[in-house]
Structure formats: structure tokens, C-alpha cells
Amino acid sequence: MSKRLKVWVSRPLFADALARLGQFVEVDAEPVERTHSAQDLRRQLAAVDGAIIGLADRFDATTLAGNDRLKVISNLAVGYNNLDIDALTRAGILACNTPDVLNETTADYAWALLLAAARRVGAAERWLRAGQWQGAMRFDDWLGVDVHGRTLGILGMGRIGQAVARRAGGFDMRVLYHNRHRLPESVECECAARWVDRETLLRQADHLVLVLPYTRENHHIIGAAELARMKRGSVLVNIARGGLVDEAALAASLREGHLAAAGLDVYEDEPVVHPDLLALEQVVLSPHLGSASAGTRRNMAGMAVDNVLAGLGLGPTAGRPPAPINPGVLDARRRGSKA
Ligand code: GLV
């Protein structure tokens, strides 16, 4: 019998997903959640043909140096700013992610944060649990910001952004978006959203949701200057990546009362949250769980397994992974050359 290929899974995964993986390959799955150092990753990856990894696992040329065994990295996320795709491609390693299966769940979550931030749900709950609701409450206490009938701004109008936009109809909102590329008219129509330049988006949105990928170019795309251009009393929601926002500048804007509130699921230095944000009651903070519904996380795990198997030429879709990021690697393999 030929030797089975080996796949490392860097974090605990659903047992049924691991069992399916185990039908085709030898599986080395981490039993507990832990942080992997670069050295740890290098050592683990040197001994396997494929890996299913999480966002906290970072891969660059150094992590891959001297590795001539690894063929596929399957990221358990749609965003892949943890991967140096050029380095992977140069090394002939296929990278895959989990797009689409999480669009609707993540869009739901953007709305959960938007509503919670605008209507002060987090702070009010903390106040109630602390036993401070005693006797009559002042009529002008806990006043939030309206969501319905206001202008929703979406920065980054990929499939998650579009799903956020489609939900705005129920709140009778005007939807503006900015994206590098304007969407086809049919999609704009379906989302009832209008393209504007970034400046107009900042100035006109009452609620601004960030849904764009994080790259070197858009590091701190929302900094002090951009926050100052946003409307007084507006709300910022970030479900994309922490590095898009200058967190100290955001905290300052909230402290000064320029922005009314923020809803954040992502942070620049996860799992560390900027202390200035932690100190503010008007920020709703959650630990990067936009895609975390039971059904969606299962679908993501299933897709990550399909990706790694197919990338290794195994399973029902051998050679045709559902979501390759650098498909040129597959073409090069077919031609028998490097990408
Ligand atoms: C989560 O942040 C993801 O990119 O899937």
C-alpha cells in the first residue's frame, strides 16, 4: 500500500470534518486552541503535505524556507492577510480560503453590531446586570441613535458588503457604497445601493460599515483625518480587519463625542484590544466572531477539508479545490512547472 499523505490541522475542528479528512489522509490535528510561533509553524509544516490553518497562523517566505514537501495551505477564513500569497506561489504551494459560505452570517453580524452600538445595547445590559435599574428611569436616559431612515455607508462592496446592503431595505435606509470598482448596474439595483467616492461616503453616512480586505495599502484607511470627516453623531462598524482603523484615533473621536458609537469585531493586534477602546462604554466589542454561527462554521470547516484534499489530488473534487486563491499553482502543476 502506498504511503498516505499527511495533513496538519492547526486548531481543533469539528469531529465529523476531521473524520472525513481522515478517510483520505493521515491527520495530525491540534487537540486544543493555542498560538503557534513562527518556529512552531516551520517545524509542523516541514513534516506534512497539507495544512488547515487559522487566521492567527501567519505564513511568509521565512516560514516556508527549505520546505519542499508542503503542497496546500487551506485557510479557515475568507480573508487571507495572514498569508503571503506571492511567497506561497513562488514556492509552488496552493493557498485556499472559504469564501461565500459565510457571507450571510457575517452580514447578519454587521447588523447585530450596528444595532447594538447605535442603540447602546452593551452598555445598557451591563448597567442592568450591575443592579443599577432601581426605580423609575429617566425619560432621557439611554438615548441612542436611530438606524431606520438614515444613510448606511458601506466601504468595500464585495459579496459580504452586498449582503449587508440588501438588509438595509428593511430599515428603510438610503445605501451608499464605495469600492475600487463600481458594481454592475444590476447588482447596484439588487442592493439598492449607489456608488459614491470615498470622501462623499465618509461625509454622508450616518452609519459606516467596513467590509474591505486588509492590505498594506489600506492600513489605517480610517484614521484621524477620515474620522474627522465623518458626520458628528455617526456610528462606525468594523467586521473586516482591525488594521483598517487607527484605534487610538477612533477612541479619541468617541471620547470627544464626534462619533456616537462603534461596533468592533476585529482589532489590529488580536487578541489584544486597545486599552482606550476598552475604557469606552459606547463601543460594542466582540472577539472576531462574524462568521461564528454553528451552520456557517461547519460549512467553512467542510470547505477547508475539500480545499486541502482537492489540492492534494484526493477526494471527490481531486485537482479542483472549491476556493483556490492562487490557481496558477494548479495550472503550473498540470504543466509540470513552477507557477
Ligand atoms: C474572518 O475574519 C474571515 O476572514 O473569514
Image: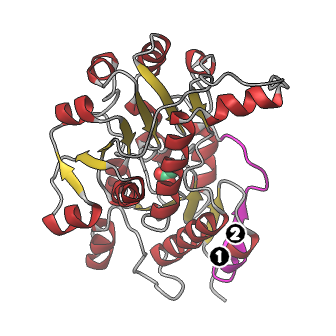
Kindly identify the residue that appears in the image at 69 percent across and 69 percent down: 27
Please state the horizontal and vertical placement of residue 51, each as a whole percent of the image: 57, 61
Neighbourhood count class around disc 2 (C-alpha, 10 Å): few under 14, some 14–19, many 20 upward: many
Q: Quadrant of residue 19?
A: bottom right
Find out whether residue 157 is within the magenta segment: no
SS at badge 1: helix
Asked if one can make out residue 1 in the rendered structure from this viewpoint, the answer is yes
Given the image, on which type of amino acid does mark 2 rest?
Answer: Val
Given the image, on which type of amino acid does mark 1 rest?
Answer: Leu
**For residue 21, which numbered disc appears in the image?**
1
Tell me which segment is drawn in magenta.
18-35
Chosen colour scheme: secondary structure
Please state the horizontal and vertical placement of residue 214, each as a whole percent of the image: 36, 40
**Vertical order, 124 against 162 (above or below):** above
Do the residues bearing badges 2 and 1 touch, measured as CB atoms within 8 Å?
A: yes
Relative to 307, is 182 on the left or the right?
left
Asked if one can make out residue 67 in the rendered structure from this viewpoint, the answer is no
Please state the horizontal and vertical placement of residue 204, each as a whole percent of the image: 24, 33
**Vertical order, 293 against 143 (above or below):** below
Residue closest to the eye, 214 or 312: 214
Kindly identify the residue that appears in the image at 41 percent across and 53 percent down: 171
